[in-house]
Image (cartoon, rainbow, N blue to C red):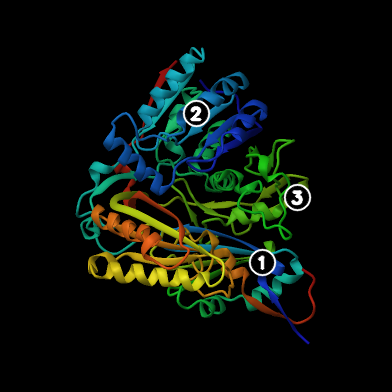
Amino acid sequence: MVPPMKRSVRIGCGAGFSSDRLEPAIDLAQRGALDYLVFECLGERTMAFGHRDRMLDGSKGYNPHTAQRMRAVLAACRKNGTVIVTNMGAANPLAATQLTVGIARELGLAGLKVACVEGDDVTRQIGPATALHDRDGTVRDVGLSVVGANAYLGADALLPALKAGADVIIAGRIADPSLFVAPLAFRFGWGLDDWQLLGRGTAVGHLLECGMQVTGGYFADPGFKDVPGLVDCGFPIAEVGFDGGFTVTKLPDTGGCVTTATVKEQLLYEVHDPATYLTPDVTADFSRIAIQQLETDRVQVNGADGQPRPDKLKVTIGFDGGFLAEGGISYAGPNAQARARLAGEVVWQRLSRNNALLGDLRIDMIGVNSLHGTAHMPPTDSEDVRLRVAMRSRRREDIDTMLWEVEALLCCGPAGGGGYRGTISPCVVTHSALVARDQVRPTMRMFTA
Amino acid sequence: MSERLKVHDIAHARAGDKGDISSISVWAYDPKDYPLLKSQLTAERLKAAYPKLLRGNVTRYELDHLHGLNFVLRDALEGGVNTSLNLDSHGKSFSYLILALEIDAPEPTSP
C-alpha cells in the first residue's frame, strides 16, 4: 500500500525516555491530530537492563511501561489515524509486539496491524576479540561478562513496516532520530541517499526525541528562565514540510513553552561538533540552522544539512557490572557539617580494615559537596547535611558490609544522626564497537489483532 | 570601570553526556552579551577554573548566529555514567559549573 505523497506531516513525541510521563502522551493521542506518534524509550543502559530482564524471564526485556502506554493510546491513535512508532521493544521486541496485539484485542481493535522490527541484537556476533571503539582494547580486556549487544539501526529498518501499512511499529535499538526520519522519508518519498533531506529529518528527530526537553522541561530556572505551567507541560509536535523545513509546537492548553531558547538548548543536547552529528542515516549538520519564533509556542527551524552516512554501524555492548549501593544518614543543626564529616571518617576507617572495600568507594556530604565537589568546594554554612556513602562492587558481600557500617552509625557514630536509608541497584557497564553494515540484517514481521 | 558578572546573569546552559564526555551549550539571553561570552568564556578559561574535574581536552564550538557556545569536555564525568560514583553520574548539573563562573563586564550590563 502506497499512501499519497503528503505536503506536510504532523509528528509528535509521546516519550523522551524510558520512564517519561504518560498523561501528556494520552493528550497527544487524543487531541494531537497527528500522523505519527513516536515513543522514544531507550538509552544505552536501559537496553542493557532489558537484556538482564530477558535473561531472568524470557518473556520480559521490553520497556516496563509498554502495557500502560499501549492501553492508554491505542484506541485514540486508531480512531485518529495516527501511526505509533516506538523502540519500547528494547531487548525483546517480539514480546512487546505480542503484548500489544493482546491489548488491542482486549480493546476491541480488531484488524490493528502491529509490526515487529528486529535484527539489532548482535550479541552472538560479539566475541572476546571484538575491538572496542570508545576505549583501547577488546571485549576481553573489559574483564566483565557480556549481557547483550545491539547495533543502532537506521530509518531503513523501519521502512518495510511503514510500506506494509503498520498501525504500530515496535522495534528495539533504532537510533533515536531515525524513529522520526523513517516516517518522514516514507511519507515524502525522500531518498535514503538525499543527505540534505535526511539531515533535516534528523533535526526534527533530534529536537523531539527527548520529549519535553524542547517544550520547557529540563529548562526552568526561576527568575531567570520561567516556564509557565510546568506541572502540565505538553509533549512536542513538529509540523514538517516536504522540503524538511519544520515548526516545533505543542497542544494549546498545555503547560510549558516552545521558545527559541528551549529549541536552542535542545539543538545541541548531547551534540559535540554541531557540523557532524552522526546517525545511521546521515552525518547531519546543525551548524547553520536558523531558529525563529513565529508566534507563542511556535518556533520555525530551517537550514539543517547533511553529508553521507557513516560507513559502519555503532554497537553498544552491555556488561554485567555487579552492584551499586548507596547508604545515607543525615545531620542537622549546629555543627552538622563537622558531625557528618566525622561520620564519613569513621565509616572509612572501619571499612579500611578490609582494603578490598575501599577500591570503588566514595563519601560525600549532600548539601555541601556531593555534585560539584570534584570541581570545586562552594562555600556553604548549611546545617542540614546528609552523609552519602556509595560503592560499586561485583561482590555482594562487600556491598552488604558497607551498608551495615553506614546503618551502624545510628548508634556507633556522631551525635544526632538519623534517617538511615540504604539501596542496592544492579549495575551495567557499556562500551561501544563498530560493525559493518552487511553484518546487520533488520527483519520485519507483521501481526494482526 | 568594570564589574564582575556571573555567567548565570547573562546566559543559560544545558548539559548532556555520552560516555565519559560531557557537552554543555551556553547561550546568551541578549545577543549584545554574546561577544563578552565569546571573548572571556574560552576553553582555556574553563579548564583552568576546574582543573581537578577537567583533566581531559576541552573543545569549544561557536554558533555565532545563534549566540551560543558548545563545550565538549573529555574525561570529565569521573569515568562516565558506568563507573562514576558521583550522585549525578550524568553530569546533568555541570551546566551550572559554567554558569557559576565570573566574567568581567566592561560596562554595566543589564541581566
Callouts 3 and 2 in the same chain: yes
Mark 3 or 1: in front is: 3
Chain under numbered label 1: B
Disc 3/disc 2 C-alpha distance (Å):
35 Å
Q: Name the disc covering residue A68, or none.
A: 2
Residue B71 or residue A182, whichever sits in front: B71
Percent x, y of residue A337: 51, 71
Q: Which residue, given by chain and number where applicable, does mark 1 sit on?
A: B64
Quadrant in which the C terminus of chain A appears: top left
Percent x, y of residue B32: 76, 70
Q: Residue at x 42, y 36 (%)?
A: A63
Vertical side of A33 occupied by B36: above or below: below
Mark 2 or 1: in front is: 2
Chain under numbered label 2: A
Q: Name the disc covering residue A194, or none.
A: none
Mark 3 or 2: in front is: 2
Q: Residue at x 47, y 78 (%)?
A: B51
Report the amino acid beneath label 2.
Gln
Q: Which of marks 3 and 2 is nearer the N terminus?
A: 2
Report the amino acid beneath label 1.
Asp
Disc 2/disc 1 C-alpha distance (Å):
44 Å
Query: Helix, strand, or loop for circle 3?
Result: strand
Query: Helix, strand, or loop for circle 2?
Result: helix
Report the amino acid beneath label 3.
Gln
Vertical side of A94 occupied by A388: above or below: below
Is residue A318 shown left or right of residue A381? Answer: left
Q: Which residue, given by chain and number where applicable, does mark 3 sit on?
A: A293
